[in-house]
Structures are given as structure tokens and as C-alpha cells.
């Protein structure tokens, strides 16, 4: 054992424990064991988690660790860990840190040399993706979009040509307007899926092109209730040789203002990954139409 090992083994362990997102049967045996064994549970909302504890007959003490006190109170949990006690971090539902508090505590613990151990389990975005039938080899998680339409639309514009599957969390009272903004920016035809109330009684997974999905939700107030994840297929370049993204054309136009055509096409190809010959042709066309 090195001296560093000896030091870190004198410290407690911070367990990051996933809890169910609806169906309590999704609580893992390992999560239950860890929650029973640790000295303290840092919980996003102690009253909420008390019900979970009661359901599983657990009596480990709970202490609040939410977004408003996490930075300051992280120190309180850190002291316990540094004194050699094990602490578990849980959120109200699913995996902590995924659109939930915990980041500061985990960061502080790791910086202090405390071992941080994940105890994986439910996570709404992964559950939705696993059943969506959309490409899952590469995806991006955008979390919650801005609540107001101007901010939301501007964020959607930024990811309009993202080729990976897009995953969003959304509040039920905003789902209809959010889908409408997605439809108008990504287009009616873009494949999408709404995953609502996962693992719960009214679980619904509805996969439709955005135009139809938006209309379906707008027409049925029941679809505007509960918790939801929205998945949207990534952008696909239109078929054919001239398929170049707006972003690549923007780069090309900027460079054309600054340097000779051949150099601009070569540099734009390097920056955007689009074929040099294609950009060269486009540059010729753009200059001839000026
Ligand atoms: N940490 C959680 C996780 O691992 O998924 C997410 C917490 S975040 C504060 C809550 C959001 O997650 C909800 O607004 C919803 O978008 C999504 N979510 C959580 N539970 C869900 C469920 N059962 N069905 C669909 N979406 C859910």
C-alpha cells in the first residue's frame, strides 16, 4: 500500500446513488445496501426522500443538499467524509447531477482525494433513448431548454444542424409550445419521440414526425401532463453533392472576404470537414453571382 492509498483509505467514500424515476421496483439491491450502510445521506429534498426511505424501511439520517446550499454545505459533507464516514448522494428521482444537484459536492470530494463511487440506476434520458428507436450510437443531452420562447428558439437554432440524436427534458406546462418551436425550427418532417411518465401508470412513448407530434400533443391536454423527455433525430444533410450545411457556407463566405478563392476553399474544408473540391465549386458559383 502506498502512502497515498493509506491516506485515501482513511477517508470515507461518497456514493452517488440513482433512485427510481417513478416505479419503485427500479431501486437496485446495491442502492438499498449502500443507503442502509452509509453514515449520512445527502438528499436534494429530505421530505421527498423520507418517503422513499420509509417505503424501503431505511433509517439512515438525511441532510439537505440542494442547488441553493450545495456550494456552502458541500463543506459539511466533506468534513464527514474526511473524518472517515461514508456518505451517499441522492436526488429526488433518477441519477444525481443529471439536471439535478450534486456537481459541486462531487467536485469538492474528488479535489479532496475522496473516492467517489457511482451506483447506477434509473435515468430518464437513457430510459427514453433505449426505447425510442432513434440512432443511439451518438447523442447529445441538452437538458432543459430556456423557459421563454425567445431563448428556447435561439438555443434550438444553434442545434438545428446537429447530426446526433438530440435529447431534451421539458416541463409539462411548456411541452406544447416547446414542440411547436421545434417543429418550426427543425421542420415538420424531422423524426421525434415524446417519452412521458416513464415507468409510471400512464407511461406513453409516441414517435412521430415533429409536425404530427406537435399537433397530437396540442390536441390532447392529457399529453401535456406529467414528466417528459423529447428526443429529436439528428440533422441529415439532404441527398446529393450540393448538400453543404449553412454553417459551412457561412465559414466559406467569411473566408472569401479575407483571402483568395482557392485558399478560402481549402481552409473552409479544413474547418468544416466538407470536401475541398465541392467548396471550391461553391466558391466559384458564389463569386460569379456577386
Ligand atoms: N436526475 C433525473 C434523471 O436521472 O433523469 C432528472 C431530474 S430533472 C430535475 C427532472 C426531469 O427529468 C423531468 O422534468 C423530465 O423531463 C425528466 N424525467 C424525470 N422522470 C421522468 C419520467 N418518469 N418520465 C419522463 N421524464 C422524466
Image: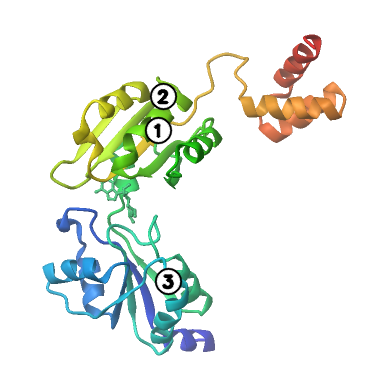
Q: Is residue 5 above or below residue 242?
A: below
Q: Label 2, label 3: how many angstroms apart (C-alpha)?
A: 39 Å
Name the residue located 37 percent from the left edge and 36 percent from the top edge.
Answer: 231
Disc marking residue 286: none
Mark 1 highlights which residue? 232
Q: Is residue 2 above or below residue 244?
A: below
For label 3, count other residues whose C-alpha is less than 10 Å away and answer few (under 14), some (14-19) or many (20+). many
Q: Along the polypeptide, which appears first: circle 3 or circle 1?
A: 3
x%, y% of residue 155? 51, 39
x%, y% of residue 271? 71, 35
> Contact, CB < 8 Å: mark 1 with mark 2?
yes
Q: Label 3, label 1: how many angstroms apart (C-alpha)?
A: 33 Å
Q: Quadrant of residue 189?
A: top left
Mark 2 highlights which residue? 190
Q: Along the polypeptide, which appears first: circle 1 or circle 2?
A: 2
Mark 3 highlights which residue? 70
Q: Is residue 242 above or below residue 112?
A: above
x%, y% of residue 17? 31, 66
In this view, the mark in front (2 or 3): 3
Amino acid at each position: 500500500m502506498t502512502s497515498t492509498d493509506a491516506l485515501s483509505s482513511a477517508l470515507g467514500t461518497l456514493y452517488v446513488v440513482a433512485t427510481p424515476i417513478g416505479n419503485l421496483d427500479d431501486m437496485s439491491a446495491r442502492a438499498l445496501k449502500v443507503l442502509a450502510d452509509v453514515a449520512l445521506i445527502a438528499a436534494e429534498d429530505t421530505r421527498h426522500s423520507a418517503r422513499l426511505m420509509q417505503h424501503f424501511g431505511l433509517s439512515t439520517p438525511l441532510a439537505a443538499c440542494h442547488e441553493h446550499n450545495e456550494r456552502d454545505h458541500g463543506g459539511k459533507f466533506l468534513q464527514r467524509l474526511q473524518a472517515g464516514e461514508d456518505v451517499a448522494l441522492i436526488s429526488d428521482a433518477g441519477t444525481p447531477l443529471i439536471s439535478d444537484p450534486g456537481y459541486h459536492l462531487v467536485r469538492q470530494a474528488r479535489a479532496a482525494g475522496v473516492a467517489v463511487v457511482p451506483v447506477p440506476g434509473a435515468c430518464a434520458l437513457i430510459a427514453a433513448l433505449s426505447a425510442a428507436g432513434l440512432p443511439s450510437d451518438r447523442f447529445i443531452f441538452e437538458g432543459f431548454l430556456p423557459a421563454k420562447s425567445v431563448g428556447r428558439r435561439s438555443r434550438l437554432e444553434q442545434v438545428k444542424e446537429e447530426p446526433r440524436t438530440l435529447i431534451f427534458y421539458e416541463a409539462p406546462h411548456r411541452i406544447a409550445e416547446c414542440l411547436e418551436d421545434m417543429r418550426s425550427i427543425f421542420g415538420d418532417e424531422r423524426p421525434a419521440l415524446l417519452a412521458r411518465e416513464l415507468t409510471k401508470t400512464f407511461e406513453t412513448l409516441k414517435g412521430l414526425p415533429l409536425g404530427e407530434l406537435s399537433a397530437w400533443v396540442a390536441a390532447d391536454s392529457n399529453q401535456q401532463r406529467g414528466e417528459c423527455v423529447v428526443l429529436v433525430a439528428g440533422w441529415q444533410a439532404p441527398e446529393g453533392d450540393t448538400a453543404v450545411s449553412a454553417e459551412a457556407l457561412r465559414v466559406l463566405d467569411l473566408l472569401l472576404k479575407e483571402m483568395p478563392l482557392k485558399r478560402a476553399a481549402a481552409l473552409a474544408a479544413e474547418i468544416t470537414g466538407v470536401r475541398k473540391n465541392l467548396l471550391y465549386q461553391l466558391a466559384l458559383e458564389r463569386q460569379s453571382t456577386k
